[in-house]
Image: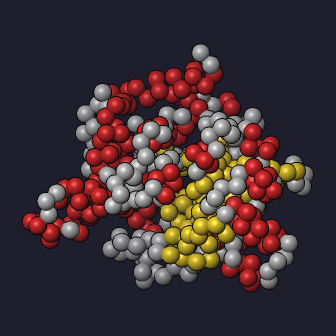
Amino acid sequence: MGNHARAETTARSACRPQLRRLRDCALPTTPPPEPERSCRRSKRASLPSPSVDQMDGRVKVVGQVERVDGASLTYAEFVDRFMAPNCPVVLTGLTASWRACEDWTLPGPGDRRRPDLSFFARNFPSPLVQVADCSSREFTDQKRLEMSMQEFIDHWVGDAHGGSSAGDRESSLLYLKDWHFVKEYPDYVAYTTPTFFIDDWLNMYLDSHPIHRDSDIANHKNETNCSDYRFVYMGEKGTWTPLHADVFRSYSWSANVCGRKQWLFLPPSQSHRVFDRYMRSSVYNLNDDVSEKLFPEFNKAEWLECIQEQNEIIFVPSGWYHQVHNLEDTISINHNWFNAYNLHWVWNLLYEDYKVAKEYIEDIRDICDDFEGLCQRNLAANTARGCNIFNRNCAPFCL
């Protein structure tokens, strides 16, 4: 048995008690409780903190995310210390063998690496990539654009060479996000998923079941775009991601191939503090002057901070709101995933969204031939999968 197979067997074996407890898929419909023991906060100040400069002192940082040598951590220890209690952690020492760390980067100052943009233009000429305009808001996210890889790189290089004024540069920062690299280039093995994250029910299911099969929801074009949750992100210094909690309330992990990122995390027990009094809208950007009238609890929020260096991987637990800024030109690899330890988070979110979708069309129930089916389609349109798909997904693991 190979090393990867042994690691996968170890990971799945550690989860069996959780799987047995879930065999009936009778999951709670109330928000999951906070873990009994709080997440450890690192007091070590080994890296300069840019929180005051980057966030203009607008948030209260009470601690740093713990940093651990991943090479000396066992799967059982990771589960016990971080995954089961739902706590973030930075893992080091896990990317040395990754092809991406060599192919995708060039030497920079000292031991730093920088993106090799010409390598991407030559080797990965994706027809279209999804790019976020960091200066433009659209609903609750940044405005998304589609362009060729070459167009994206030309824009980046033009900024780096002073092709625009300082004001134009700030207003034109583009961030390549959600690039389904593994699906587009399956023969190019850029990295190996660390042992801690291979018990991934979401992507295992989606490898053989595209999310959208209903032509009312999606056309053939985005069938591939929605077929997994393994992404590559690329952005120059200054690009950022607004405050959010991850899709489906999944776990995520993010590895810096090169560059530095600042993360600010808010525990789930305090998530209400970034919402308005009606729990309908949340803070978009921590850099903004957040209205105390609209968000009366915001100033009480207590944040954890992390400065993620190149070759480090951060584990983002379920339900933790976070905002991320690229402090240098950065390339990262990101997965969203769930398993037995956070399945209740996923179910609770889908169930609450289902209730909203159902209430929204309740007035047409009497004239609808398939009211439940319509509810599921509305849910799928908003969350990319309905409860019935969730049940089919989970059934094999709940025996």
Residue 87 at least partly seen: yes
The residue located at (61%, 37%) in the rendering is: 193
Residue 5 sits in which quadrant?
Answer: top right
Which quadrant: the C terminus? Answer: top left
The residue located at (54%, 34%) in the rendering is: 198
Position of 172 compared to 285: left or right?
A: right
- Could you say where residue 388 lies in the image, as x and y percent from the top left? 28, 46
Q: How many marks?
A: 0
- Could you say where residue 261 lies in the image, as x and y percent from the top left? 69, 58
- Could you say where residue 154 lies in the image, as x and y percent from the top left? 77, 68
As drawn, 265 above or below 288: above
The residue located at (56%, 29%) in the rendering is: 75
- Could you say where residue 308 lies in the image, as x and y percent from the top left? 69, 53
327 and 117: which is toward the camera: 117
Position of 328 compared to 7: left or right?
A: right
Which quadrant: the N terminus? Answer: top right
388 and 218: which is toward the camera: 218
| Residue projecting furthest to the left | 366
Q: How is the image coloured?
A: secondary structure
Position of 395 compared to 63: left or right?
A: left
Residue 352 at least partly seen: no
Residue 342 sits in which quadrant?
Answer: top left
298 and 200: which is toward the camera: 200
| Residue projecting furthest to the top | 1
The residue located at (71%, 67%) in the rendering is: 151
Residue 23 sits in which quadrant?
Answer: top left
